[in-house]
Amino acid sequence: MSTYVKNNLNSIWNQTLTLIEESDYFDSATFNAFIVNSTLYDIIDDLAIILVPSVINKKVFESVECLSFVQQKLSEVMDQTMQCEVRLKKDIDAANANQPAPKKEVILEDKLLDKYTFDNFIVGQSNRESHAAALSCAMTPGKFFNPLFIFGNSGLGKTHLLHAIGNYVKQNQPDKKVLYIYSEDFITLVVNSIKDKTIEEVKEAICNVDYLLIDDIQRLAQWGRSQEIFFNLYNKLISNDKQVIITSDIHPSELKGIETRLISRFSSGLSVGIDSPEFETAYAILEKKLEGRQEEVLVQREVLEYIANRFSADVRSLEGALNNLIFKAILFNPEIIDLKFAVEVFKENPAVVNQDDTLSVMRIKKAVCEFYGLTRQQIESKSRTKSISNARHIAIYLCRKHMDLPFSKIGAEFGGRDHSTIMSSYDKMTKSIKQNDMTAQAVGKIESKLGIS
Ligand SMILES: Nc1ncnc2c1ncn2[C@@H]1O[C@H](COP(=O)(O)OP(=O)(O)OP(=O)(O)O)[C@@H](O)[C@H]1O
């Protein structure tokens, strides 16, 4: 393999030609017709490859007197004994044209943010399942849940969990390759690499990762070509037991503009939701965010309670409210940050509260699960265990009775069941409530817990 760059080769050859010319070994007509128009194409160890323009030039150059003299002068320049091989320029050009274009190296940008870790992620009821599933994927890739699909409204910690997985893997399994990519960046990468003709290299680089962490997948909607590429990459990764973790603002079954075959693949792993933080979690998050800043601003406990209650819809609003409070505290420098000060700061901010007062399928499932000590996965599952299917029937009954949702929509919320299964569940529960006091009482208690009795 040559270690010479083009400039070096030119300089070596110019020096050699100068020595030849100065030696007067060839008359000037011979030198100009057969020697000066040659070039040094490459040097591999002690072999120099010389290019000449025509067959006649080659014949002359290869004559014993000529070749041995050129070798001698080149050896002087190189300060080592050199051999020369003469080739026709057109042969080299043809050989080069048949070579496949050299592969361009693609380096996927590392966009993992160190600041999001499992250590600074506060776990509460609203995110316990997604946290546990994320941690288990970080510890044992591709084994249990593949893909892991985390869904929930904006600002509830999905991105934080993705980065936390990546950072955990980087720290504990440094030999594993992790790629965190935001869906829109994936589209840009695909579009640009199609333009640059590096798409094959990009695909290969993605297929080589051990963890693909893809954020906000709903943004792939409408991007047909990118979806196609993603679908193929996704299949390869999953079939090679590489861990794929996806986030979205909605459940996979409700993704619009994403091909059904992709959606059904997403549903084949584990889908876990993140809810708005309940009071205790919201409070703990605020405390965590204040860690190390208490010197700077001393915030009274009741102020944190006030913010946790008032801005509990999502964690981003909580953080925003806390930052606003701190900013105002630095600006006005009150003696103490008490409730009076906080009320003044937020008097013009509408509260961003947890939608707990609005009835939703999620709230109904949550209330039923709490009543029977089950998880949401269990009531959405295919399990026919009596206790689970009974709880499922009640949740379905309440969704229909109080939200008047179409059976098919309820089916989508309960593990993709069809219209007639949900209808039969609803009928069964309606009958059971009439015939069985225990069931009627249980349903009554859940309804009153939800404030809808
Ligand atoms: N449980 C938690 N503990 C600590 N911080 C949290 C928690 N949940 C969310 N956060 C913080 O809230 C902010 C918003 O979270 P994140 O960006 O992960 O939300 P998201 O669900 O991905 O939102 P989007 O769908 O808009 O991308 C981040 O600063 C994150 O660190």
Image (cartoon, helix red, strand yellow):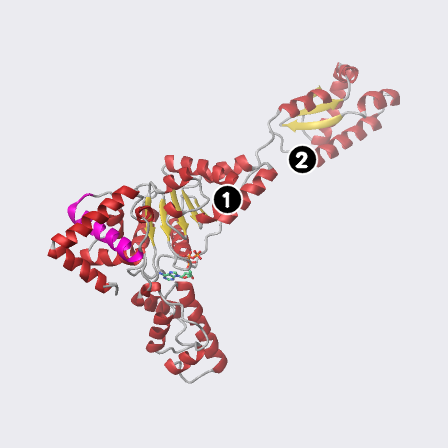
Local secondary structure at mark 2: loop
The image quadrant that residue 152 belongs to is: bottom left
> Residue drawn 75% across and 17% down?
58
Closer to the chain start, of discs 2 and 1, is 2
Callout 2 environment at 10 Å: few (<14), some (14 to 19), or many (20+)? few
Compared across the picture, whether 47 is left or right of 275 comes to right
Residue 255 drawn at (x, y percent): 41, 47
* Residue 297, placed above or below residue 274: below
> In which quadrant will I find the C terminus?
bottom left
Please report the bounds of the magenta region as a residue range: 384-403
Residue 253 lies in magenta, yes or no?
no
3D distance between C-alphas at marks 2 and 1 = 47 Å
Residue 148: x percent and y percent?
35, 46
Name the residue type under label 2: Val
- Which residue is the site of mark 1? 222
Q: Residues within 10 Å of mark 1 (few under 14, many from 20)?
A: few
Q: Is residue 173 visible?
A: no
Specify the quarter for ligand 1. Answer: bottom left
Which residue is identified by label 2? 5
Mark 1 is on which residue type? Gln
